[in-house]
Image (cartoon, rainbow, N blue to C red):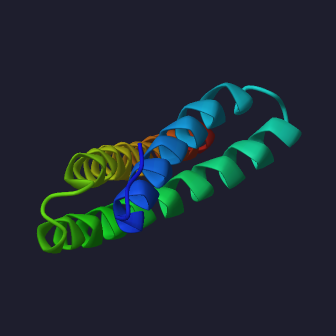
Amino acid sequence: MDTDNKMALGALVCGIASFLFGFCSCPLSFIPFVGGIASMILTGLSFLLAVAAVVTGALGIKAAGEMAGEGKGMAIGGLVLGLVQLLISVGLTITMIVMGGAIAALLMNSQAM
């Protein structure tokens, strides 16, 4: 895998790393206190790496057009991995906010009785 398209390679590495950090953060959240903090840190890193994968993937595709298509597959792979991880992160964040609001409403109703 000898390529001069460093953006494409960076996109693929960031995309794979964002998936690994995202999936490693889930089991850690079940460990009290320390696991929760580690899970939040890994989730944040996963989100940042996904953004980096999307940006470098787009730049890698543009660079591949100027380099006769060299590294275009890696750039597309990194871009897709980054976009999927971003969708997962945003979806889970929205779900946690909604569930937190629902739990708070249930607690408020149970205290009112």
Nearest the viewer among 105 and 37 is 37
The C terminus - image quarter? top right
Identified at 63% across, 32% down, the residue is: 24
The N terminus - image quarter? top left
Identified at 45% across, 41% down, the residue is: 99
Image location of residue 6, percent across then percent down: 42, 65
Task: Judge left or right: residue 8 versus residue 32.
Answer: left
Vertical order, 8 against 56 (above or below)? above
Image location of residue 100, percent across then percent down: 51, 46
Q: Quadrant of residue 7?
A: bottom left
Q: Is residue 33 visible?
A: no
Task: Judge left or right: residue 70 versus residue 32.
Answer: left
Image location of residue 23, percent across then percent down: 55, 32
Nearest the viewer among 82 and 38 is 82
Vertical order, 9 against 60 (above or below)? above
Vertical order, 25 against 50 (above or below)? above
Task: Judge left or right: residue 42 versus residue 22.
Answer: right
Image location of residue 25, percent across then percent down: 64, 37
Q: Is residue 110 visible?
A: yes
Q: Quadrant of residue 112?
A: top right
Task: Judge left or right: residue 23 versus residue 9.
Answer: right
